[in-house]
């Protein structure tokens, strides 16, 4: 059973607007979360992380929000750029354990 | 920059063949991983290794085995390929020993088709 879910397979956003990608998880023991970005024909690359002691982490245009009570995290990209068009995976892990990945959301930023 | 390389980008094999997928990392990482990526299922962990000659099963190890004879190299073996093993295979490595809550660095992937 999928422990990490990304319910939106795709998302289209105008350049300059905000992109919001969502991720839900079922395991309350998860305490570390990552977002990866994947371009076609390349492996995923790390984007941003957050641990459960925080509810927000920011890195430039990218911000990840964690709502532990709702078992939900989201990635905000502001402003969105055409180069952000990629598949985004969220991943979660328990302490010292493997990562579980979501199914991915394909983001298209329209110029 | 960390570099993770995989021996083939595309591979076509026949049912029943033994298939070797090779992965090499150049950053002296202890941990190495093999995943498969399928539409609607995301990345699923097949096997991982936290040291030379050590291996641990992931979520979907059936039909696969691995070998780690050298720190930088982690091989995935399909003993007898089947059509349901047609997939994108991704190798990854990370630097912390026996802890996996760290960023993983991925190779470009091998798209395997089993006919």
Image (cartoon, rainbow, N blue to C red):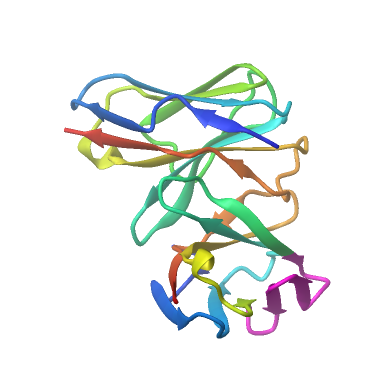
In depth, the one of B7 and B85 nearer the eye is B7
Residue at image position (70%, 77%) is A66
Question: Is B105 rendered above or below residue B51?
Answer: below
Across and down, in percent, residue A65 comes to: 70, 78
Across and down, in percent, residue B21 comes to: 42, 25
Image quarter of residue B50: top right
Residue A98, can we see it?
A: yes
In depth, the one of A15 and A77 nearer the eye is A15
Question: Is B86 rendered above or below residue A52?
Answer: above
Residue at image position (74%, 66%) is A50
Q: Is residue B13 left or right of residue B44?
A: left
Q: Is residue A88 magenta?
A: no
Across and down, in percent, residue A38 comes to: 50, 55
Which image quadrant: the C terminus of chain B? Answer: top left
- View extreme (front): residue: A111
Residue at image position (54%, 77%) is A22
- View extreme (top): residue: B69
Q: Is residue B83 left or right of residue B47?
A: left
Across and down, in percent, residue A51 comes to: 77, 66
In depth, the one of B75 and A58 nearer the eye is A58
Image quarter of residue B60: top left
Q: Which residues are magenta?
A: A50-72
């Amino acid at each position: 059973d999928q422990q990490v879910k990304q319910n939106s397979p795709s998302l289209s956003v105008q350049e300059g607007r905000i992109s919001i990608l969502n991720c839900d998880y079922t395991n309350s023991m998860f305490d570390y979360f990552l977002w990866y970005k994947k371009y076609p024909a390349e492996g995923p690359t790390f984007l941003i992380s957050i641990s459960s002691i925080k509810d927000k982490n920011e890195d430039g245009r990218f911000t990840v929000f964690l709502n532990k009570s709702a078992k939900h995290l989201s990635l905000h990209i502001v402003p969105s750029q055409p180069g952000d068009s990629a598949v985004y995976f969220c991943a979660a892990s328990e302490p010292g354990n493997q990562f579980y990945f979501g199914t991915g959301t394909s983001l298209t930023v329209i110029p | 920059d960390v570099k993770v390389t995989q021996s083939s980008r595309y591979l076509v094999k026949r049912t029943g063949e033994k298939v070797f997928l090779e992965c090499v990392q150049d950053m002296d990482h202890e941990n190495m991983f093999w995943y498969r990526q399928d539409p609607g299922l995301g990345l699923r962990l097949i096997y991982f290794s936290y040291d030379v000659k050590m291996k641990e099963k992931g979520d979907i190890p059936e039909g696969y085995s691995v070998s780690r004879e050298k720190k930088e190299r982690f091989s995935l073996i399909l003993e007898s390929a089947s059509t349901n093993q047609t997939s994108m295979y991704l190798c990854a490595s990370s630097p912390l020993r026996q802890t996996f809550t760290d960023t993983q660095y991925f190779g470009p992937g091998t798209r395997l088709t089993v006919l």
